[in-house]
Amino acid sequence: MPGLKPGPVDSHPGRPLEDHLLQTANLAEQIALQYLGQVPENLQAVCLLHDVAKAHAKFQKRLKGKGRFPHAGPSAYIALSVTGDIVTAEVIRCHHTHLASNFINEIWCNSNYQEIRQVVGEIPVWQGSEAVTARLNINPGKWQELLPSSEGWDDLLYEIEDNTVLDVNLWLKIKILYSLLVTADRLDALSGRGINLEMPGFTDPGNVIEGILAGLKPTPLTKWRNQVRNEVLKKAEKTISGPGVYTLTLPTGAGKTLLALDLALRIARQESKGGIIYVLPFITIVEQNSAVAKTIFPSVQEDHHLAYDDSSPEEHTSQLQRFVSLFRYWKEPVVVSTFAKLWEVLYSPRGNAAMSFHRLANAVVLLDEPQSIPARFWKGFGNTLEFITAKLNTTFILITATQPKMVRGRELAPESISVPKCRYTAGYFKEPVGIEQMLVTLNRYEMSRLNTMVVANTRRAALEILFMIKRSNVDDDSLFFLSSWVTPADRKRMMSEIKTREERELPRYLVATQVVEAGVDLSFDLVARDIAPLDSIVQVAGRCNRHMSERQGQILIFELINEEGRKYASSVYDAVLVNITREVLGKGLEKNGGPIAFSELEVQDMLKEYYTRIADALQDDGPWFDIQKGNWDCQATLFEEPVYESTVFIDRSGEIKATLEELNETGNKLEDRDKRKQLWKKIQEHAISVPEKELDQWYEACGASIWDENEKDIDKISAGLWIVNPRGVGRIYQPDIGFIPWEIYQKYYD
């Protein structure tokens, strides 16, 4: 009959569309009020209209597995007609994809309006939609009635084009709405009808930190650390006045982790902050600092791609926990995460990556070791922090011993703070040497009787050093190796073993790559380091006589070259940073053909010169400057992915192969994705990344023609995915060494 509305329509199988739209709006408003303290303009319209085109008959057929219908575009055109707001419409248009560059001209002004009117004309006003339209104060007989004429549409676009500037302010407005819509939409879709969502609020733990400090084992640095803590807290009380960007520059060993969390708690308490987000450069540090945070706060979310919580069986996992696991949403009031994740939250144009953006509002964000961000991004990242602070009531604290010139922050540590006495002296050998020559020099510095750490720039160089040391009389029980070719599970085990030997005052020798640069609470008497950017050298120096023992430590910096005479540093680091480092290190005096010497007490002045020269050399590079130009869909990768590297699983018992088979059999529906992600996380602890060519060499060497998979040492599962079978563990991969390239294996084992 004419005028009769069609029957119920669904947003998801068995879920009425109006329920999804209303619940998404309710969730988004609840989240906005909790973290922003207010509901952004047009948030309700964004949520109520984002899926309205799902009422189209083609989408209803798609729910039954027939055909396809892209619903975001038509929903966006209806939203623009209802609100006249391009921000609302653009957020809806890309809520399943990503933000676009120059979207007004490239997308909206180039659309076929007659085709759009026809599609919208096919979208019915369904039974049950009154609850949605009433909240928008509209009452359409047909959705097409809301669209203007062709002339009216052109006029609307001309007006939008004339009055819209694609600047950082518009980007922020879109980013906030985008973050809230995508979070609420995905959460409601995953949870279904009748969800009772309660986002946990920040809980003040009281004076628990005082108890933790009282229980710490005394060391020679205890008295100094207490003095540092008191002076910083005293200055911070006078310096911190509302949202802003602050710096905390303290020598290694000063107890920065606990002090930073104490500062964050005091700020959160005083300014009624909604949460604390602790950001670190490496997963190993995230795990360590997360453990500290968990001794203070009742609930801490550890967020990185290896984080895995098996505390409750899947059937008992709450809807919100499943959502957090699937999308890595920052749910808890206290989150410990990585710079790579923060970078995605800030800059990624993808909806799922940007979900936690609103969590930065009214938060205390601790940025530990910010110099780990590539130097070319420092300027833009600093500008981003200042912008976010001004707009979202955020407090940032940059914490490091090597504070870069990244931002104009107010310093929280008094200038008078320095270590009670010089913990180490250093020497720079500017003439290039091979690995064997370096080891000869280390023996002259009594490496055989001192607890020693040697840090190389490449995994191959580190392995060569390890095997050369093994030829000496060093006891294997005291010799350790750490690199990214060692699985996270084995790295944790070895770190624990090294720490135990340190506490028992047993001999220990560590050969490593840059994985030990920051946040690793180990101490050695003698530290050797291949040349690197100065901040990296100073971070490694923080592992030399870390706890200020009576014997002064010694650091030696070398210019290592391979057998062809090529410097290892040139294949890893930016040449500008290394050259500036050489010039800064080379200013000292060279005595009797020995190294150019300096001490820990001179390091801060050297860093100031280093960072000043870097700042002068930096160009406008990175996502911040793309955003300012309206280029919002640029890739926002913080660290460049290694070229042609594959994931390799180390399967000691055959269990990983079984898990991979289970993964392969698991579907890819929404309800299956959480299971897939949990299975993947569980085996990531036993995964490394290795160049494809290295794996091919082992595959050929082991006999690629063997047909019985149980007889293979190594096998290629699919493109970019390999497995070292139980037979290959101990040869291709050794638990105490990690992956060994075929050429190195031949050299030292065959």
Image (cartoon, rainbow, N blue to C red):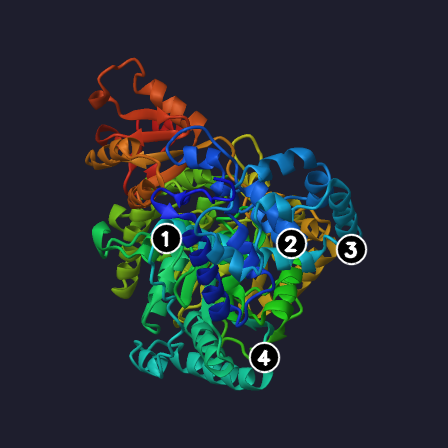
Q: Along the line of sight, which residue is nearer the eye, 220 or 308?
A: 308
C-alpha distance separating marks 4 and 3: 34 Å
* Residue ID for mark 2: 87
- Check disc 1 and report its element: helix, strand or loop: helix
* Residue ID for mark 1: 323
Residue type highlighted by circle 1: Phe
Q: Which residue is pictured at 57% across the width and 33% down the height? A: 565
Q: Disc 4 or 1, which lies upstream in sequence?
A: 4
x, y percentage for residue 238? 58, 86
C-alpha distance separating marks 3 and 1: 38 Å
Label at residue 242 = 4
Closer to the eye: label 4 or 2: 2
C-alpha distance separating marks 3 and 2: 12 Å
Q: Disc 2 or 1, which lies upstream in sequence?
A: 2
Q: Which residue is pictured at 53% across the width and 56% down the height? A: 133
Closer to the eye: label 2 or 1: 2
Residue type highlighted by circle 3: Asn
Q: Is residue 264 above or below residue 580?
A: below
C-alpha distance separating marks 4 and 2: 30 Å
Residue type highlighted by circle 2: Val
Label 2 environment density (alpha carbons within 10 Å; few <14, some 14–19, many ≥20) = many
Closer to the eye: label 4 or 3: 3
- Check disc 2 and report its element: helix, strand or loop: helix
Quick check: 18 left or right of 727? right
x, y percentage for residue 378? 64, 56
* Residue ID for mark 3: 163
